[in-house]
Image: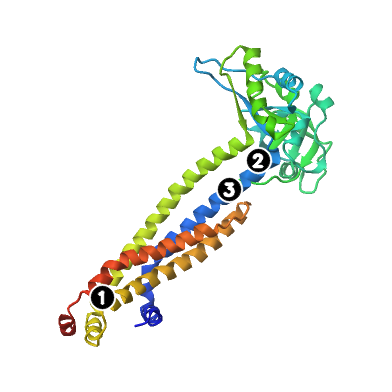
Amino acid sequence: MRFGEMLALAVEGIWVNKLRSALTMLGMIIGVMFVIIIVTLGQSLNEQVAEEVEGMGANAFTLLAVTNEDGQRGRLTLEDCQFLETTIDSIEFVVPIAYANYTAAVETSRAKKGTTLIGTSPDYIKVDQMGFNQGRFFSEAENQVGRRVAVISQQMADDLFGPGSEAVGRTVRINRLPFQVCGVTKPQAALLGIEQSTTFIPVKTMLAMSDDKDIQQALARVKTGDQLQAATVQSVRILEMRHAVKGGFMTQTNEEALEQFSTILAVITSVFGALAGIALLVGGIGIMNIMLVSVTERTREIGVRVALGARRRDILTQFLVESATLAAIGGSLGMLLGIGFGALISVILEMPVVISLGTILFAFGFSSAIGIIFGLYPANRAARLNPIDALRYE
């Protein structure tokens, strides 16, 4: 019997037993679908983070104060940022960043909203390419005198003043202190569909609002990429000398941050992908079970075919084709559902839609392989039936 005839018989058998075949393929459909969804979301999230990191510039690095092995912690100050900027020739600029370790309250007579409050310098817009719907970022003069001006998001402006209202020049209260809005940013890319509400104020204003005069981190950009590694080493060395704290500072380039995030995301994706793979194994067990039932139901048919000259190899191949066809159809349906739901979820979460052809082919091939592997025992059992006993079977 030719392969085409075997395939036609397999499809006919699936069509005749539609409900049984659908239930058998369900494990395959679910397994392939979730594998593709999980990998798609992981790659989409990684692409979104990569775009944000690239927007900050490949020639940038972050400076952080940490605690060394002796329990001593480094310090970062505005003076440190200015010193590094003027001392290290390869550094183009250093952006200080101070942020509140709590959710700040921004309010007007209309509404009250929580926000992440960040104090920084005007150079921040060079590492975060934010656009403005209204107004501008605050100036260096406003930063130097510690003026109470704020840059808020468009969503915040709509909540506080009403959709379409002019927010620039109006007053908001941040932690009960009056601030004048100088700019309204365009909506930022949401991470996992969650829009980040961030409010920016001059860093000197931020420090004046707290007892702590240190900043949490600094972003530095070098003039050329080949100067990046030397600038990170030199910056740490200078800070350790200024504050007499060995091992109290660390640096992280944007590429290192992206690699670290990608590694963590790959582990998470692998774990959830393995869980989805269990559904594929369960589907394979279902295929084995239904093929064993099929062998029992078709025992007399097998005996007739052998009596008419069919070889054991033909019987074995026929049942393998049937099990592989079940798995392939289930894998195809799961592939289509996985692509559709993966793309839909990415769009809902406002992430780039990344469909991996390699993952699709792997999931489809794996499901087909499972169909063949789990169909091997029933097929071998059918091929070994004694034709005389098979003909006598009722």
Indicate which disc, 1 or 3, sits on the residue closer to the N terminus.
Answer: 3
Disc number for residue 104: none
The image shows residue 227 at horizontal and vertical percentages of 69, 30
Query: Callout 1: 10 Å neighbours few (<14), some, many (20+)?
Result: some
Residue at the spot x=37%, y=75% of the render?
19
Cα separation between marks 3 and 2: 12 Å
In the displayed orientation, state which residue is furthest to the top: 244
Cα separation between marks 1 and 2: 58 Å
Q: In which quarter of the image is the C terminus?
A: bottom left
Residue mark closest to the camera, 1 vs 3: 1
Q: Name the residue under label 2.
A: 53
Report the front residue among 201 and 380.
380
Indicate which disc, 1 or 2, sits on the residue closer to the N terminus.
Answer: 2
Answer yes or no: is residue 192 visible: no
Q: Which amino acid does label 3 sit on?
A: Leu
In the displayed orientation, state which residue is furthest to the bottom: 308
Secondary structure found at label 1 = helix
Q: Mark 1 points at which residue?
A: 295
Query: Callout 2: 10 Å neighbours few (<14), some, many (20+)?
Result: some
Indicate which disc, 3 or 2, sits on the residue closer to the N terminus.
Answer: 3
Q: In which quarter of the image is the N terminus?
A: bottom left
Disc number for residue 45: 3
Cα separation between marks 1 and 3: 47 Å
Relative to 179, 316 lies left or right: left
Compared to residue 159, the image places residue 369 above or below, namely below
Figure quadrant of residue 228: top right
Q: Which amino acid does label 2 sit on?
A: Val
Relative to 280, 50 lies left or right: right
Query: Callout 3: 10 Å neighbours few (<14), some, many (20+)?
Result: many
